[in-house]
Amino acid sequence: MRTLLVRLPLVIFLAACSYGRFNNQSPADNITSDEFATRRQQILEKMSLGDVALFHSSPTVNRNDDVDYPYRQESDFYYLTGWEEPEAILILQKQKSGETNTVLFVRPRNPHMEIWTGFRQGPAGAMALDGIDTAFAIGDFHDMRGKFLYGAAKLILSDGGDKVFRADLDEWLANAGNYAPAVIQRANTITAPMRLIKSDTEVTLLQEAIDITGTSLIDAWAKLKNLDYEWQLAAEVEYGFKKQGAQRLGFPSIVGSGKNSTILHYETNRDPLDKSGLVVMDVGAEYHYYTADVTRTVPVDGTFSPEQRAIYELVLKANRAAIDAVKPGINWREPHNIAVRVITEGLVELGLLEGEVDTLIAKNKYRKFFMHGTSHWLGLDVHDVGGHHQADGSPWELQPGMVLTIEPGIYIRDGLESVDPKWYNIGVRIEDDVLVTKSGHKVLSGDIPKTVKAIEQVMR
């Protein structure tokens, strides 16, 4: 079905996609309890005798008055447990005897509160997970923490962003004196390298998030000519996410037309659509915690002008050249270097830059038009963990199982110095999600149209 993306008439294509999506929501697509248990075991294997690892869930965040933001679990905590409820703590203990202990503290069952806010699994639900040795009510942690932390050689800690918990723990550790762990290590120094390499199931979830995103984009393009505001276009895309089973947005949608297409992280999405301009749509559905991140740039009226097409074709050339470079063993920065060269050469050919290409690159002159990096990691977070360098300070080399974005762009703001006004307010970004494979790469977003011909055909 996906290979027929552009060949099928739009209505038939969308109907086929909708049928496939609604019949592909089985639990088998999700991560199993034993995979979460395997991840915890991998951390225990990296720990030394006498170490304790503590992971705290995300706090609930107040929106206003008595209204909280919808809850989303902290990514590391979810990665290790699959537990989606707030107020939880995971303890991994590697005793000096070599024995290990895996403990969850969770909210207890509360029939009264469950009437208002839904079912709680409680300690019994936690014990049903693979590899959990014991489970307790979260209120017991304060009385029991000394059992785990007193005399520990090292505390590997993730506070989950809960400042209240962290302040209380820091006070307790200070009062523990010589009984406190001798070393505190940030947990993401262990979890980030693990999360960089995706399992087959994780890739399946990412692919589903990307497919949902692509179908929603195509559906929205078909309606674009009849829309008047950026927020209407954003609503069409986000409705498509929900309709196909995405639990939430991976990040705030970026839908900027005309002058707003030149703002990198434009999230207001409230202006009228520029009927003669381009619209940059940087969006991503989140499916079972894994997020897509796809950008497509299309003409609001369905047809690229000569200037828009020239810039678009240049960005597309850079996008393809950078993707072609993705393979195991290369420096993760190499796709960006390739995109920079292609864009700089093209800007010289178009007369937007003057000079020798190597000199222009060395002096960062291209940054007048292309001022951001080309790649970031993708997974549980839209800007996923892993950073730019390994623990020893060397840059990451791409490995099978890594997923990264490739997203070159050109942004020509109104009034930009030494630029012919015919180029003003042309912003183009083309972003794909790419899996590193043993033999090279796979473009997970490769079925989402991005050539001029394909986009104009969909919008016709």
Image (spheres, rainbow, N blue to C red):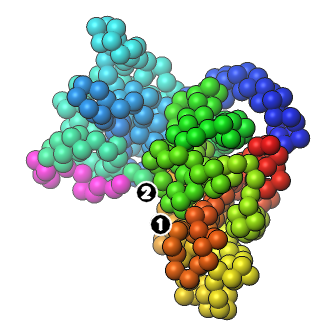
Q: CA distance from mark 1 to mark 2?
A: 8 Å
Visible in this render: residue 114?
Answer: yes
Instruction: Please tell me whether residue 298 belongs to the stretch shown in magenta.
Output: no
Q: Which residues are magenta?
A: 174-186
Q: Residue at x 83, y 40 (%)?
A: 5
Left or right of residue 169: residue 24: right
How many numbered marks appear?
2
The residue carrying mark 2 is 189
Please identify the quadrant where the N terminus is shown. Answer: top right
Q: Residue at x 67, y 23 (%)?
A: 25
Q: Which mark is residue 391?
A: 1
Pinpoint residue 348: horizontal percent, then vertical percent. Answer: 69, 83
Q: Which mark is residue 421?
A: none
Q: Is residue 269 above or below residue 134?
A: below
Pinpoint residue 19: horizontal percent, then vertical percent. Answer: 76, 23
Q: Residue at x 29, y 12 (%)?
A: 113
Nearest the viewer among 228 and 84 is 228
Q: Is residue 275 above or below residue 407?
A: above
Nearest the viewer among 255 and 336 is 255
Q: Amino acid at mark 1?
A: Ala
